[in-house]
Image (tube, coloured by chain):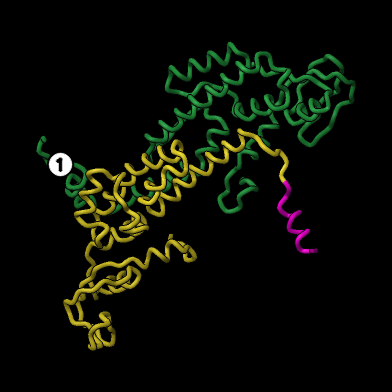
Amino acid sequence: MAGQSDSHLSLFSPEEVEFMAEDELVEIVPNLRMDSLNFICGDYGPFYPQIATQVPLWLAVALKKRGKCTIRPPQWMSIENLTRVLEGERDSHAFQPLPFHYVEISRLLFDHAREDIPDIYMVRSLIEDIRDVRFHKVETNLEKFTASTVTWKNMSAMEVNIIRAFSGRALQAFYKHENEHMMPDTDRTQDRQPQILNAPKRNLKPR
Amino acid sequence: MANYYDVDDILMDEEFVPVVFHKAVNGVKIDESTDRGYVEQGSKAELPFWLARELHLRQAISMSVPACFNQKTRLEIQADAACVDLRSRCPYFYEFGCKLAPLCDKTIGLLLSYSFKIRYKEVLYKAHTVAFGAATKFLSFLTKEETNLYEAAQSSMAAFKKWRMGGPRLQRASILGRKRKATD
């Protein structure tokens, strides 16, 4: 599967990642009465005023734009939870569990449903902080990797997407070079190895 | 393995390699300044890699290490790989080295992986943090492969930042513009 925006690189643009995130379900409280909607992706509704129901994000945004519902911010978007996650991110080396599309979902909700989110400024700055901390972690992880196994749990879609092109190429190059010097006859490489890596450094005179 | 239509691969084959002829060859002229139409046994010349490889496989010549992999470069890479200007030495440093290693000096492989490991980190730092204009000096040191890496990282980061800033949500499909132009 590849994105449409760039034909030869087979990459996703951030907009395409956002498009995929719009399939995530959110809870809305409609203020209209409407029969159920039957889509290829599933049936949603029927909608009754003040009765909460689950719909995909794109539908929620469309209804919200027309003033037909309020969106209930997801559980993880509460200040308590986000503060806890931020602390966890700062303290530990691993990524804290967050929804796969948390960057995109939060962006869409901030754009379209700002009045439905309590303490929006706090929530927004917490999410920005979490994202920055996590991306810094991604970078430090990238520094360490070589052609060996790479296991990072709980990375989100956008974070993966940002480093996709870079890390793909880098891993290929690592793989190529690792194999390059594994391949030739081992006895010769091994006795030459110290010459390159651990050759005596020049002793500079102290001034 | 090597893609026939890959321009980089073709350009890489043009890199010169110093060679020594083992056999006398008639009917060729390597040095323009002489009138002789043949090459003596034991004479030295620089040939493009594609030719040198074929002759090497036929035992007509032996290759020696080109300037970009010589002892001086090795020492520089050992000292600080990130600051070595590899582009001016050979823009296809890694690819060339990979092809050359089995034919002339197998330690090149080690040199390549060592220098890539160090330079990779530098590319990573610069690509995600430094503003585009500030990194130009650093960019001019990078080989083709490293530049590709750098640009990949830079462009996806830029795309993400653009997305985060917002802007027009709807884009005109490129096909619409094209159609109109054709009818004009």
Up-down: is A187 above or below B104?
Answer: above
Secondary structure beneath dot 1 equals: loop
Q: In the rendered view of the protein, which quadrant contains the C terminus of chain B?
A: bottom right
Give the x, y percent position of residue A26. 72, 23
Give the x, y percent position of residue A103. 60, 28
Q: Residue furthest top?
A: A80
Give the x, y percent position of residue A146. 37, 39
Q: Residues within 10 Å of mark 1 (few under 14, many from 20)?
A: few
The structure residue drawn at horizontal position 61% and vertical position 52%, both measured from the top left corner, is A7
> In the rendered structure, which amino acid carries the disc numbered 1?
Lys
Would you say A145 lies left or right of B31 here? right
The reply to whether the magenta stretch includes residue B94 is: no
Q: Quadrant of residue B38?
A: bottom left
Up-down: is A191 above or below A110?
Answer: below
Residue marked by disc 1 = A201
Give the x, y percent position of residue B68. 27, 58
Q: Quadrant of residue A32?
A: top right
Q: Which residues are magenta?
A: B172-184
Q: In the rendered view of the protein, which quadrant contains the N terminus of chain B?
A: bottom left
The reply to whether the magenta stretch includes residue B174 is: yes
The kind of secondary structure the magenta stretch mainly shows is: helix
The structure residue drawn at horizontal position 37% and vertical position 53%, both measured from the top left corner, is B143
The colour one sees for chain B in the rendered image is yellow
**Callout 1: chain:** A
The structure residue drawn at horizontal position 58% and vertical position 48%, both measured from the top left corner, is A10
Would you say A3 lies left or right of A178 here? right
Pick the residue in front: A126 or A102: A126
Q: How many marks?
A: 1
Q: Which chain is green?
A: A
Pick the residue in front: A108 or B162: B162
Would you say A107 lies left or right of A181 here? right
